[in-house]
Amino acid sequence: MDLTTYRDKFEQLETPFYYYDTQLFKQTLEEANRCAAEIPSSMVHFAIKANANSTLLQYVKNAGMGADCVSGGEIQRCIDAGIPANKIMFAGVGKTDKEIRLGIENDILCFNVESLPEIDIINDLAKEMHKKARVAVRINPNIDAHTHKFITTGLEENKFGISMEDMIAAIHHVQQADCLEYYGLHFHIGSQILNFNSFKMLSCCINKLQKKLDAAGIKTMSINVGGGLGIDYDHPQEHDMPDFKAYFDTFKRHLELRPGQTLHFELGRALCAQCGALITRTVLVKKSGTKQFAIVDAGFTDLIRPALYQAHHKIINLSGTGKRQKYDVVGPICESSDVFDKDIHLSTVQRGDLIVILSAGAYGFVMASQYNCRHLPEEYGTENLK
Ligand SMILES: Cc1ncc(COP(=O)(O)O)c(C=O)c1O
């Protein structure tokens, strides 16, 4: 993402704000689709939780991708964007009745269920509405994704999914429900995964489970391997897209699909993180002992990942040209965790300089809050800046 061409435009805007490179987003979706197409009957769903911006969702729709939603609000956002309901999957451990009804009413592709009580609830609601709902069972494969402990989801200790031992019983439970149709298996082992061996292990685990399904005479229409493909937060400008080919190849090589099975992917971060940046302005530079703080007008209310997950984002001084110096880049919020990074080298920072936090297109604006009665940041795409 080359931001220097937009510097003058950025100067005129109120900070902080998100900027999305929509051309890069479009190219990223196309590249993911192109590489996924190497696996016959595969389908990529954009994980809306990563970025629900309505303009970006138009690109998702135009790319022919489906959506992975985790709330009624996300389902509605996708429907409003024109993403066909038969490409929408709905996951989450605690779906409310209202959200389930919305999914049934729109005849979404499937509900990814995480517990037996949830299966009963969806069946009851479908019966009430004189409809049938498709259901995939989320299995916890107990695989270590070697990622940060707050974003791993596939371990036994996490709250997600049904254990492998209970898989057959859960599927029978779905099959016995009169208003449900068993669709397939769902997995998701975590996020920001860079070690492809975790995906290979997931594939091998699914192969074993499929053998169990064959032995039990259970026909499974679809396998959903979730999302989780990581991106390069350290070198976003050099690697503005993940290695989609290697990622999809891992599943192509290791996963043994049954004839007619559809393979679903639910990628979030990999599709949008590198397309977004948070643009903030330096309020002042404070010196304290040997430390220098670049205090900017964005805080964890705008981008919470560093405070929440100890996440690292590359930061640049878009205005600065002077010699590089060491800074802690911090926000104005009254919490000591309001730090974007410590001891990083930036071109000399002065009051008013534009500081850019890169790779912020995923889990950025969607997690923003109004703590301290702050305003939500604006979002601009390349189009709005032309
Ligand atoms: C079930 C499920 N699918 C997909 C995703 C998207 O993950 P990522 O953005 O890492 O691709 C998540 C993220 O938390 C998830 O929980």
Image: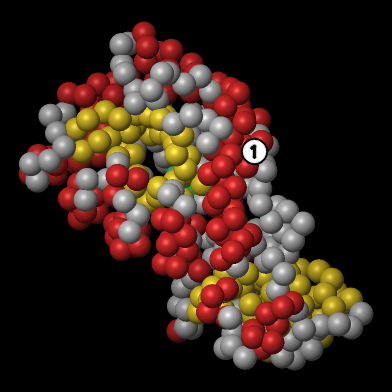
Question: Dot 1 surroundings within 10 Å: few (below 14), some, or many (20 or more)?
Answer: some
Does residue 153 lie above or below 27 as drawn?
A: above
Amino acid under label 1? Answer: Lys
Quadrant that contains the C terminus:
bottom right
Residue under numbered circle 1? 245
Front-most of residues 75 and 312: 75
Residue furthest to the right in view is 323
Res. 378 visible in picture: yes
In the image, residue 286 lies at what x, y percent?
A: 77, 87
Residue at figure coordinates x 35%, y 54% from the top left: 83
Residue 182 versus residue 74 in the image, above or below: above
For residue 273, side relative to residue 175 (left or right): right
- The N terminus lies in which quarter of the figure? bottom right
Residue 334 lies, in percent from the top left, at 58, 80
Rendering quarter of residue 348:
bottom right
From the top left corner, tell me how far across and down residue 227 is, in percent: 51, 43
**Mark 1 falls on what kind of element?**
helix
Q: Name the residue furthest top.
A: 215
Judge whether residue 143 can be spotted in this image: no
Quarter of the image where one finds residue 3? bottom right
Image quarter of residue 143: top right
